């Protein structure tokens, strides 16, 4: 009897905790659950029921926030892109080189913590899903803008823009290779990336 009572009490506490979550916190919880599943298996193999179960929520609640599976996927990819952008925001008070290195370290820490999801998101950027492609490409364009700002390039020349965009592509490829092989340390990867970023001319 004591065990049954304890279980009921725990369930009541769980439901009470869920009720106390704000709309924003509940939505974030659902997105985080979806991101975990995206990192574990192909999106076609993930159902709305799987996401609800991962989040400890009901399917009706999930559908209250996201009316379709596609909407949930797009929101999850956008949320991950936003999180990475915030994690790697430049500190304007630092000189250029320390500013870039701090952002690089933050970038690598984030992808290390979200390795499978990072792979899934970048691979989604080359899928047939136009909305996901737009999210990935917008994120890359924003990195280019940040780099231009860090190098104090008010209006990058075509040569400078191509160089910055090319480096962002190298960043993505290098990170994906590192996640696959772990052939060098994270610090060595950061050194390699920092050394590869010359001042745009």
Image (tube, rainbow, N blue to C red):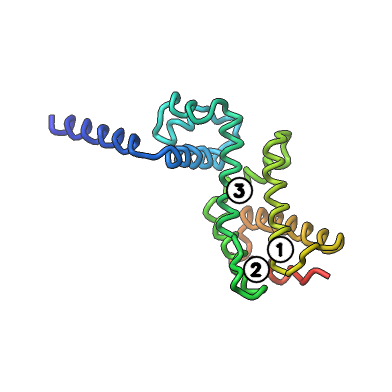
* Residue 166 vertical position relative to residue 199 in the rendered view, above or below: above
In this figure, which residue is indicated by the disc labeled 2? Answer: 100
Q: Which quadrant of the view contains residue 130?
A: top right
Q: Residue furthest front?
A: 154
Taking the spot 71% from the left edge, 40% from the top edge, the residue there is: 133
Mark 2 closeness class: few <14, some 14–19, many ≥20 residues within 10 Å: many
Q: Secondary structure at mark 3?
A: helix
Q: Earlier in the sequence, mark 2 or mark 1?
A: 2
Q: Quadrant of residue 14?
A: top left
| C-alpha separation, residue under disc 3 versus residue under disc 2 | 19 Å
Question: CB of mark 1 within 8 Å of CB of mark 3?
Answer: no
The N terminus: image quadrant: top left
Q: Hey, which residue is sitting farthest top in the picture? A: 60
- Distance from disc 2 to disc 1, alpha carbons, whole Å, reads 8 Å
Q: Which residue is mark 1?
A: 147
Front in this rendered view, residue 151 or 129:
151
Q: Which residue is mark 3?
A: 81
Point out the tag, 1 or 3, that comes first from the N-terminus: 3
Residue 113, how many percent across, how many down? 52, 54
Q: Quadrant of the image for the C terminus?
A: bottom right
Please report whichever mark, 3 or 2, sits nearer to the chain's N-terminal start. 3
Residue 88 vs residue 187, the one in the foreground: 88
> Label 1 crowding class (10 Å Cα cut-off): few <14, some 14-19, many 20+?
many
């Amino acid at each position: 009897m004591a065990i049954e009572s304890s279980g009921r009490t725990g369930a009541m506490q769980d439901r009470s905790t869920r009720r106390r979550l704000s709309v924003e916190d509940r939505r974030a919880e659902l997105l985080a659950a979806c991101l975990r599943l995206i990192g574990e298996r192909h999106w076609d193999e993930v159902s709305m029921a799987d996401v609800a179960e991962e989040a400890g929520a009901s399917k009706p609640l999930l559908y209250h926030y996201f009316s379709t599976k596609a909407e949930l996927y797009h929101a999850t990819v956008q949320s991950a892109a936003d999180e990475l952008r915030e994690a790697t925001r430049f500190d304007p008070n630092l000189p250029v080189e320390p500013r870039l290195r701090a952002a690089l370290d933050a970038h690598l820490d984030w992808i290390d913590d979200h390795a499978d999801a990072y792979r899934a998101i970048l691979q989604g950027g080359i899928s047939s899903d136009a909305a996901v492609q737009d999210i990935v490409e917008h994120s890359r364009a924003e990195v280019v803008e940040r780099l231009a700002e860090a190098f104090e390039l008010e209006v990058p020349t075509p040569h400078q823009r191509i160089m910055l965009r090319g480096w962002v592509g190298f960043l993505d490829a290098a990170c994906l290779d590192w996640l696959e092989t772990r052939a060098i340390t994270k610090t060595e990867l950061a050194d390699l990336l920092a050394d590869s970023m010359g001042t745009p001319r």
